[in-house]
Amino acid sequence: MNYLKQYRIPFTGLGLGTHDFEFGIDKAFFDCYDYSIVKDGNLKVVVNLLKQENMMVLQFHITGTVVLTCDVCLSSFPAKTDIEERLIVKFTDEDIAESTEEIMVLARREHELDIAGLLYEYINVAVPHYIKCSEQGDNITCDETVLAKLNDLAGEQQEEKQEKQADPRWEALKKIKYN
């Protein structure tokens, strides 16, 4: 987790106004998270921080490629990604404060903002539920040998299913059901 220290923004010394920060994300970033959907990638993060007296507004722009695994043929392929997110950070004197998806609440004594978890979440949420080479990849098609093998296996399963349905005991029971 020491690797993730570079994804902290020290905001106490910053003056009021707009400040820009840039970060790079690669395989080492995703290795810090055990159950990440994305295992590799090459991304550039630009964070625009607008500091005000009682709050900060952060605009995230994440661009680059992530390596995804196709749900159909199980091959890995690079997929382009372009993510825009916004976060509002409010400060409070109270110890108990609830954050939401768009609003983060920090104690006034905090001096830096750790955005590693936010970046991880933004990237993984942007990954589609169903990943397919031909849809998310750039001029990539699924592996034909894997697809042929899957079709062969599907044909064998259909034959087994038909053999199981030929049992005369089930046919007799079906006749009773419809009488």
Image (cartoon, rainbow, N blue to C red):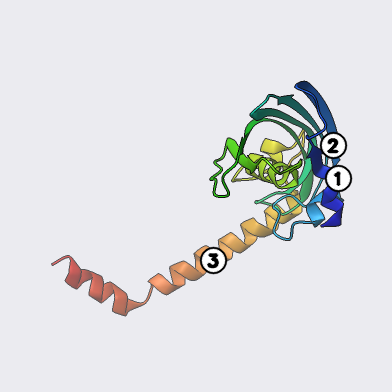
**Toward the viewer: 8 or 159?**
8
Q: Decide: marks 1, 2 in contact (CB < 8 A)?
A: yes
Q: Where in the figure is residue 69, as x and y percent of width and height?
A: 72, 50
The tag earlier along the polypeptide, 1 or 3, is: 1
Alpha carbon separation for disc pair 1 and 3: 52 Å
Q: Amino acid at mark 2?
A: Phe
Dot 1 or dot 2, earlier in sequence: 1
N-term-proximal mark, 2 vs 3: 2
Rendered residue at 30%/75% (across/down): 170
Front of the two marks 2 and 3: 2
Numbered mark located on residue 157 in the image: 3
x%, y% of residue 73? 70, 52
Q: Which residue is located at x 57 percent, y 61 percent?
A: 155
User: Distance from label 1 to label 2 (Cα)?
Assistant: 8 Å
Say which of marks 1 and 3 sits in front.
1
| SS for dot 1 | helix
Q: Quadrant of residue 104?
A: top right
- Give the residue furthest to the left: 179
Q: Which mark is residue 6?
A: 1
How would you rate the neighbour count of disc 3 (Cα within 10 Å): few for under 14, some for 14-19, many for 20 or more? few
Under mark 3, the amino acid is Gln
Q: Quadrant of the N terminus?
A: bottom right
Identify which residue is drawn at 17% across, 65% down.
178
- What distance separates the C-alpha of mark 2 from that of mark 3? 50 Å
Q: Position of residue 171 (x, y in %)?
A: 28, 73
Q: Is residue 116 left or right of residue 154?
A: right
Which quadrant holds the C terminus? bottom left
Question: Which numbered disc covers residue 115?
Answer: none
* Residue 34 in picture, x, y percent from top left: 73, 61
Which mark is on residue 23? Answer: 2
Q: Nearer the viewer, mark 1 or mark 2?
A: 1
Residue at the top extreme of this rendering: 17
